[in-house]
Amino acid sequence: MGASAPDAAASSLVHGRDLDQGERAWTLAVAFTRGKSPASFDQWFSGVQFDSLTDGVLSLRARDEFVRQWVEDYFLPTLGDRLRVQTGLSIQVRWCIDGTLDRPVADRPASFAPVQPRALSVRPRSSDDASSPSDASAHRMVPAPPPPLPRVLAVGPPIEGLHTKYTFANFVVGPSNQLAHAASMAAGGAGGRRHNPLFICGGTGLGKTHLVHAIAHRVRDERLDARIVYISAEKFVNEFVQALTDQRMHEFRARYRDKCDLLLVDDIHFLAGKTQTQEEFFHAFNALHQASKQIVVTSDKYPQQLDKMEERLVSRFQWGLVADIQAPELETRVAIVRKKAQLEHIELTDDVCLYIAQSVRSNVRELEGTLIRLAAKASLLGKPIELDFARTEMAATTTARPNEASVEDIQRVVCHHFKLRSTDLLSKDRHKSIAFARHVAMYLCKQRLKCSFPELGRAFGNRDHTTVISAVRKVEALRTTDPEVRAHLEAIERKLGSVE
């Protein structure tokens, strides 16, 4: 597809043939990305060739390593985001270096065409040269214009604290994080309804910080002049205390109220109990919200579960969208392991990938850490990462918990407590007493085993994961408000303690 071709977004034909689904998605993404800076796009993509887009794997060729690196750094984030929106898949890029490209994505702009120096003569100039202009021009040294330097894309100042690999292109999407991902994409300007504030909650190591960083990267790619502030709640507290000490509150307030277009705050629950800091954050929140500036915060709890947090702040956190992230289900864990292996250039077979995903269920951070440890040990010993090797090494490094309660153990203890049969929990019976016991069992399984919602749904009679989510949230709320429910849970947990 050359730069002079008709707008790809308006046509389903290129070179006289129908586009397949992957090519159509690529063509639309290229049209969108090129529209932001046509000359710069054509310059770099004259050295890139599109081969295919199949099952989320984008195959590209680059003329050389320099072109590949530049395109990967400055164009692929936008392209990857557009492709993900159109296909619903996590995009992985497979590069090939090829000096001869048959079908470059774009034609090189004429203004960037390299100037070929003519053949020069070094014969000394004589007096006859002055009287023979044509001969003189044929023999005297004529300096060729220097080839133009590559056009450098403008790059904004770095954003303190951001991880370069935490982008949307590197985030694996699954049922457990789909809502949070879509809301984050919208907050970053990728289309869809934008919620303000966006409150992302979930346990440790499930991807909250990754999404926050990805929003910042996305906004910076779209608007180089955007004033982005990313900070942890702990650092916010420290800056506030320092500003009070130094009597520089006017600067502190200007940073968070007037000189900020996007505020990203990690671990907002750290503000709990800090009355003065909450007061300051409250006013900063109001100033930004009234100016329609995007606010994104993360927490390990839902807003209503934040202890020692002012009610007016809690209510404001609920103004926009509360998007939770749960522990990833097996399929998503497999995809995460594969993605991490690709990013770290680790060769991994499908059976090892599946084994790691089945063995580590708690969170993404532990999943990725396990893979890195295996790769480091294999490299040290000069061995490939095979299934037997993975089993041996993971058994040696994983804390043995032979007496840990299983889903079946929890179901059995709950049934004994409520004097029910185990089949009652798995049945379709909606009697109030049975439904309540089923909800309690689901809640305890989620709290103690960190299973994903789809996994729990399958363990409780193949129920939909949304049913499990509703049950867990209902019991969580009742535990804090209903003494009788709290007493039931404490009694069951004591029994589970003796089982373990």
Image (cartoon, rainbow, N blue to C red):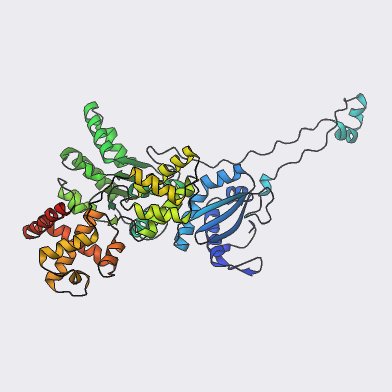
Residue 14, given in percent of the width and then of the height, sits at: 63, 65
Rendered-image quadrant of the N terminus: bottom right
Q: Is residue 118 visible?
A: yes
State the residue in front, 11 or 47.
47
Residue 190, given in percent of the width and then of the height, sits at: 42, 56
Tell me which corner region of the image, top left, top right, bottom left or bottom right, holds residue 493: bottom left
State the residue in front, 185 or 248.
185
Relative side of 268 to 440, left or right: right
Circle count: 0
Q: From this view, report whether residue 363 is shown above or below residue 252.
A: below
Relative side of 75 to 361, left or right: right
Q: From this view, report whether residue 402 is shown above or below residue 424.
A: above
Question: Residue at 89% of width from left, 36% of height from top?
Answer: 134
Q: Can residue 168 be seen in this view?
A: no
Question: Residue at 30% of width from left, 37% of height from top?
Answer: 254
State the residue in front, 376 or 446.
376
Tell me which corner region of the image, top left, top right, bottom left or bottom right, holds residue 279: top left
Relative side of 195 to 102, left or right: left
Relative side of 255 to 277, left or right: right
Residue 115, given in percent of the width and then of the height, sits at: 73, 41
Residue 356, given in percent of the width and then of the height, sits at: 39, 52
